[in-house]
Image (cartoon, helix red, strand yellow):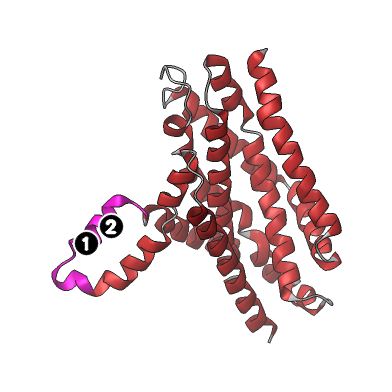
Amino acid sequence: MDALITLILEFAIPAVIIAAVFIAIVMFVLPREVRTIFKRELKAYFTSPIAYVLFVVFLGISNTISFFFTGVLEGGEADLYMPYFQYLPWYLVLIAPAVGMRLWSEEQRLGTMELVLTMPLAPWHAILGKFLAAAVVLFAMLVLSFPIVWTINYLGDPDNGVIMSGFVATFLVALCFLAVTCVVSALTRSQLVALLVSVFICMILWLGGLPHVSEFLMNMKGGWIIFWPLLKLINVLGVMPHFTELAKGMLGFRDIVFFLSFIAFCLFATSIVIRLKRA
């Protein structure tokens, strides 16, 4: 019972508050054009099997692996970073692009992109509305991960503030991967191509922050030196170090700025692609 009360007080209520604030922003702050696109996209997700399939895949993989293969039940410590959060971005490398692959590719395939772009709205209205709708799907996936939180509270007395930080870090990584997919989806009419290219880029962004990559750059010699600028850029854009800091409960301003700047840049890049297609 104590674990259930903790789950309600420290996770359910904050999730409801965040959802309420988001709804208030969408309904009363964002322009009407953004709300129109947002509602259209959100309805498209939940009136097709895609959202439900992704929910089952994500929750099935993340909870099953955590419960049965990472030793969360036998670890003896009320901690979720090692058995759970450090693996979540690996799942999101596939799940986030799968959520976002249809954002613009579907419009181009059906020939409705021209219709959307000729509507009396700015490109950023459509971009933001689509992005927020996909973000809601990812947020719902993380909220439905509550069984792992309930279990760890039932087994011990964890620092739920750190666990909440882990979810915040995971959501920010998911939004980064979604923003990348948004750009790629605007470049192609094929959802499969958008998925594969986005997964490849997201994998590079995740692995680019590995300490081994930094060590390789420091020791680079000979002909490999010509690849230094590219590898250095990948290393700088790597999301792993920022995720690790946040997921361990160390809320750093620099890490938050990195994630928000990365997302904003990708959405800006999407707007450039859309404007070129509109021209």
Viewer-proximal residue among 143 and 255: 255
Check disc 1: other Cα within 10 Å, few if <14, some if 14-19, many if 20+.
Answer: few
Residue displayed at 83% across by 76% down: 119
Check disc 2: other Cα within 10 Å, few if <14, some if 14-19, many if 20+.
Answer: some
The answer to which image quadrant residue 220 occupies is bottom left
The answer to which image quadrant residue 39 occupies is bottom right
Residue displayed at 58% across by 36% down: 164
Q: In terms of secondary structure, where does tag 1 sit?
A: helix
Is residue 110 visible in the rendered structure shown here?
no
Residue 72 percent location from the top left of the image: 45, 23
* 213 vs 95: above or below: below
Residue wearing tag 2? 214
* 250 vs 67: above or below: below
Residue wearing tag 1? 218
* Disc 1 residue type (three-letter): Met
Viewer-proximal residue among 188 and 130: 130
Viewer-proximal residue among 192 and 66: 66
Outermost left residue: 222
Is residue 231 visible in the rendered structure shown here?
yes
Q: In terms of secondary structure, where does tag 2 sit?
A: helix
Image quarter of the N terminus:
top right
The answer to which image quadrant residue 216 occupies is bottom left
**Residue 127 located left or right of residue 181:** right
What residue span does the magenta drawing correspond to?
A: 209-225
Image quarter of the C terminus:
bottom right
**Residue 113 located left or right of residue 59:** right
**Residue 267 located left or right of residue 120:** left
Residue displayed at 80% across by 56% down: 26
Residue displayed at 48% across by 22% down: 78
Marks 2 and 1 close (CB-CB < 8 Å) = yes
